[in-house]
Amino acid sequence: MYIIVAGGGKVGFYLAEELLNSNHEVLVIERDPARARAITEELTDAVMSGDSCEATTLDLAGVARADLVAAVTGDDEDNLVICEIARNRGVPRTIARINNPKNELLFKKRGIETTISATQAILGQIEQELPTHEMIPLLQLHSGLELVEVRLPETAPVAGRSVRDVLLPPESLVALIVDPGGVPRIPSGETRLNAGDALVVVTRRESMDKLREALIGAIHGLDT
């Protein structure tokens, strides 16, 4: 694959290094000439000095033949612009680093489906360590889908009901059920849900609140 990495900071440098070690063709574009010279010593000819927010720079980098563009600068606005230019040049896939999680919805609305937020990743890891947390993000999938774990409390409105009787948001699916004893089950429509079950659900990020309401009801512990 030919991959353009926009941004030669620590994230971009180590990403490019790993991709090169995996035998991909990689080009890092770095705006700061001094930084570009510094990483050239490590990455040799896989570095280009220039502004990735400019279409002419991306054209010189061969964006038209790129399989993927990863915009990993420290500026969310720049990353959005880079991805939009790449998409307009026909790049089949773009990935954007998001520094402020509040900007994620803007990226989604502009058609940038694959985003990486270090804040959200760390938060998700912390939430997995909190046994009382009822809705845990597990993984971002392609096309705006997410994999989440939902733990059913005693007050869950779906406890005692079968999967087919639960009205989930559109494009949502219960993929796996793990009972309190840790035994996993692939559910059918007749599978009964019980308090204490952990459900692995595929859904859309914009449907999270509706999913919570359908499976958990009022936010547990905050409904008084």
Image (cartoon, rainbow, N blue to C red):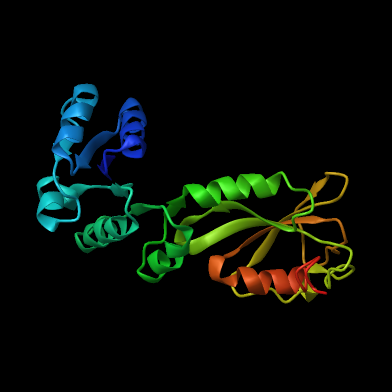
Question: In the rendering, at what x and y percent does residue 201 appear?
Answer: 67, 60
- Single out the residue that lies furthest toward the top: 41
Question: In the rendering, at what x and y percent does residue 155 appear?
Answer: 87, 68
Q: Quadrant of residue 135?
A: bottom right
Q: Quadrant of residue 49?
A: top left
Q: Residue at x 84, y 68 (%)?
A: 156
Q: Quadrant of residue 189?
A: bottom right
Is 5 displayed left or right of 158 in the figure? Answer: left
State whether residue 61 is above or below residue 172: above
The mark tally for this picture is 0
Question: In the rendering, at what x and y percent does residue 29 appear?
Answer: 20, 42
Q: Quadrant of the N terminus?
A: top left
Q: Residue at x 84, y 51 (%)?
A: 179
Of residues 201 and 27, which is closer to you in this image?
27
Is 206 displayed left or right of 198 in the figure? Answer: left
Q: Quadrant of the C terminus?
A: bottom right
Is 171 displayed left or right of 105 in the figure? Answer: right
Q: Residue at x 81, y 65 (%)?
A: 221
